[in-house]
Amino acid sequence: MMICRLRSLLSLAKCSSQPFQSPAAAAARTFSSSHHLQNVGFIGLGNMGSRMANNLIKAGFKLTVHDKNSDVLETFSQMGVSTKKTPYEVSEASDVVITMLPSSAHVIDVYTGPNGLLHGGKLLRPWLLIDSSTIDPQTSRNLSATISNYILKEKKGDWEIPAMLDAPVSGSIIAAEAGTLTFMVGGSEEALLSAKPLFLSMGKSTIYCGGAGSGSAAKICNNLALAVSMLGVSEALALGQSLGVAASTLTKIFNCSSARCWSSDAYNPVPGLMEGVPSSRDYNGGFASKLMTKDLNLALESAKLAGCKYPLTSQAQQMVTWD
């Protein structure tokens, strides 16, 4: 019965994979990316963004940063990093701008709000804008369409019109610090190839997902699968211990059998079984339940718009939501 239900869910959507690089796209432009990537703006210096920015600094990029938290800005200022009071000021100092923000509303405000990145009329200094926030795909598509109506203040190689990539990440704070994130990227493949040095400075894997909004869509699906698997692993470990089987024993079984997943072998939810994960630090520093709730809400809305059934999404959303 379960297999039949899963088949019915999977039959509602068809997947197509696209390679990271095609010969045609690679040869499409002659573009000195290193020169046009040197000045990087970074907006959103929270748990993830601050670590991503630090890795760019280590890689030798010249950063200009902005965040609403003045203490964070002071920390970067003491490191010799240029700080700005508004997103627009960051834009004016940068060839590329990366944003890492909590929600769609924050992204829209940083781009289109007062003193936002797009504040200066129809002319833009940066040739590339990369949004690594986890937001709904439609917002990503709308912003990409808006930016396509702008022109560059100064031509960069063959680029006359700025490009935008939605490039949310998978990986914990630990991965952000280690520079081992996975980027799911939507937008121009040519822009992605030109910006490859940036992504390699912050992550170990960059996967091209398709046109604008595809990276955001892929991230929503990834986090939906994470939520369901984490809940399943946690419930199974709790049940097993109640039945007299040690969590360590169950974990060994899971990790060499069909129950193996990231939640069991890399992010185990039981304290004391794995070093360096939130469960072994009194659940500090992990992925906040309110952010997972946000991501599941995005998945629910996306499923409704796509006309898909979402029984597991709905159940997971109810389980991780607290007042």
Image (cartoon, rainbow, N blue to C red):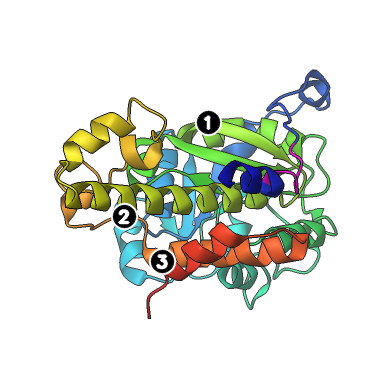
Residue bearing the label numbered 1: 205
Residue bearing the label numbered 2: 286
Residue type pointed to by label 3: Val
Q: Residue at x 19, y 48 (%)?
A: 243
Q: In the rendered structure, which disc, 2 or 1, sits on the residue that comes first in sequence?
A: 1
| Residue 5 placement (x, y as % from top left) | 64, 49
Question: Would residue 53 be visible to someone looking at this image?
Answer: yes
Give the crowd class for mark 3: few <14, some 14-19, many >=20 residues within 10 Å: some
Q: Residue at x 59, y 68 (%)?
A: 110
Q: Nearer the viewer, mark 3 or mark 1?
A: 3
| Residue 199 placement (x, y as % from top left) | 54, 36
Q: In the rendered structure, which disc, 2 or 3, sits on the residue that comes first in sequence?
A: 2
| Residue 106 placement (x, y as % from top left) | 56, 70
| Quadrant the C terminus occupies | bottom left
103 over 178 or under it: above or below: below
Label 2 element class:
loop
Front in this rendered view, residue 43 or 260: 260
Q: In the rendered structure, which disc, 3 or 1, sits on the residue that comes first in sequence?
A: 1
Distance (Cα) linking label 3 and label 1: 29 Å
Residue 13 on the magenta span: yes
Residue 320, labelled with which disc?
3
| Residue 62 placement (x, y as % from top left) | 48, 43
Distance (Cα) linking label 2 and label 3: 14 Å
Q: Which residues are magenta?
A: 10-15
Label 3 element class:
helix
Residue type pointed to by label 2: Gly
Question: Would residue 81 be visible to someone looking at this image?
Answer: no
Please say if the residues under marks 2 and 3 sit with CB atoms less than 8 Å apart. Answer: no
